[in-house]
Image: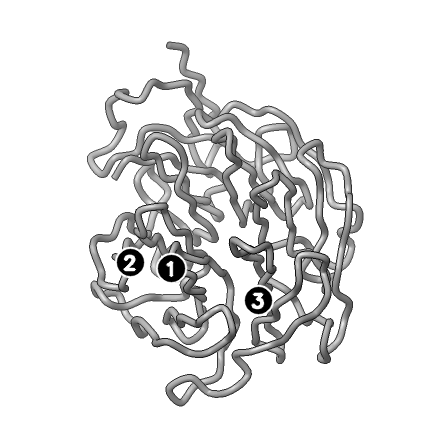
């Protein structure tokens, strides 16, 4: 199989490859591929910071250039499109709906934009403000089995809002203290098979779990680098078997939890070599047991089988 290397002097070396399911790891901790590199060309990144996986296994990544790029599961560039406005800031979250639509947290425009798989804008909701139906810096979107939409936001609101499938505001929750602390930059959302909403409460260094009606269930973790600790959890994904994946921006690692929140293992460490991370913003379960991590400050996505 052909391997291409892009050498970026003084920054990083990125390898992009096609590989089969049984390809041997490139590192001792399970990296089987990497794609990206610093730049504005197709397939390169300007500080990538959100990721989502389509049903086909294709990978969507958004970066600070305001681009959403689609890659094959092996990291081959497929297509891209740009956000309609970027002068105020760039998105930090995107989610693929069951029907293929792509929901983007257009953070600095205080709204959610909806694209079809071809990258055409087909809808939006929300506006700037602190009231019902308004956002302050939305960060992520989750969608339940009934089509209800959940949006996390920060910058003073620091709450979750719930919306109907037709984008009508339903309610907000999370404004009250949870075990003595209000939510502080809820950065990511995911819903498990039991209908529990998991929230990455980033600046409180913990995970908060809610019912879909907004009742607090419990919290998991606190600040630190141990097995039951987090440093700025910025993303969260949940596999069909209930396994939870946490991406720690401040810990430069991934952290696996059981369906009930027990720590199972972690992966990574600070650095620029393959198998190391620098300020990762996002991670997602892919096809065939792969995990994709947005290695933001290294401007690449690493593919691992930990």
Residue at x 28%, y 35% (from the top left corner): 305
Circle 1 — which element? loop
The residue labelled by disc 3 is 152
Classify the position of the C terminus by image quarter. Answer: top left
Chosen colour scheme:
one colour
SS class of the residue under badge 3? strand
- Circles 2 and 1: CB atoms closer than 8 Å: yes
Q: Which residue is mark 1?
A: 194
Q: Residue at x 71, y 42 (%)?
A: 115
Left or right: 81 as drawn, with respect to 217: right
Secondary structure category for the residue under label 2: loop
| Measured Cα–Cα span from mark 3 to mark 1 | 20 Å
Q: Position of residue 87 (x, y in %)?
A: 78, 54
Residue 297's spot in the image, x, y percent?
Answer: 48, 48
Q: Quadrant of residue 274?
A: top left
Q: Could you say which is closer to the camera, residue 118 or residue 282?
A: 118
Judge from the rendering whether residue 176 lies leftward or rightward of residue 167; answer left or right. Answer: left
Q: CA distance from mark 3 to mark 2?
A: 21 Å
């Amino acid at each position: 199989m052909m391997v291409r290397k892009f050498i970026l002097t003084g920054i990083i070396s990125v390898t992009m490859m096609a590989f089969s399911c049984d390809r041997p790891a490139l590192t001792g901790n399970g990296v089987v591929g990497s794609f990206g590199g610093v730049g504005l060309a197709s397939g390169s990144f300007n500080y990538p910071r959100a990721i989502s996986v389509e049903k086909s296994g294709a990978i969507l990544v958004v970066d600070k250039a305001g681009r959403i790029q689609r890659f094959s599961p092996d990291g081959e560039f497929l297509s891209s499109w740009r956000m309609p406005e970027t002068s105020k800031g760039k998105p930090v979250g995107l989610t693929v709906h069951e029907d293929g639509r792509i929901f983007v947290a257009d953070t600095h425009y205080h709204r959610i934009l909806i694209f079809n798989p071809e990258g055409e804008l087909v809808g939006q909701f929300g506006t700037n403000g602190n009231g019902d139906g308004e956002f302050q810096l939305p960060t992520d979107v989750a969608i339940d089995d009934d089509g209800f939409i959940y949006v996390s936001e920060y910058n003073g609101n620091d709450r979750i809002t719930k919306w109907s499938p037709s984008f009508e505001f339903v309610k907000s929750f999370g404004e009250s203290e949870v075990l003595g602390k209000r939510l502080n930059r809820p950065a990511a959302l995911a819903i498990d098979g039991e209908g529990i909403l998991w929230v990455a409460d980033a600046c409180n260094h913990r995970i908060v779990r809610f019912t879909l009606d907004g009742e607090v269930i419990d919290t998991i973790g606190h600040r630190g680098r141990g097995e039951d600790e987090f440093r700025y959890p910025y993303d969260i994904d949940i596999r069909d078997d209930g396994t939870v994946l946490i991406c720690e921006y401040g810990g430069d690692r991934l952290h696996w939890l059981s369906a009930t929140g027990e720590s199972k293992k972690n992966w990574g460490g600070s650095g620029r070599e393959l198998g190391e991370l620098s300020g990762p913003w996002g991670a997602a379960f892919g096809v065939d047991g792969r995990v994709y991590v947005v290695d933001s400050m290294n401007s690449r996505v690493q593919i691992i089988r930990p």
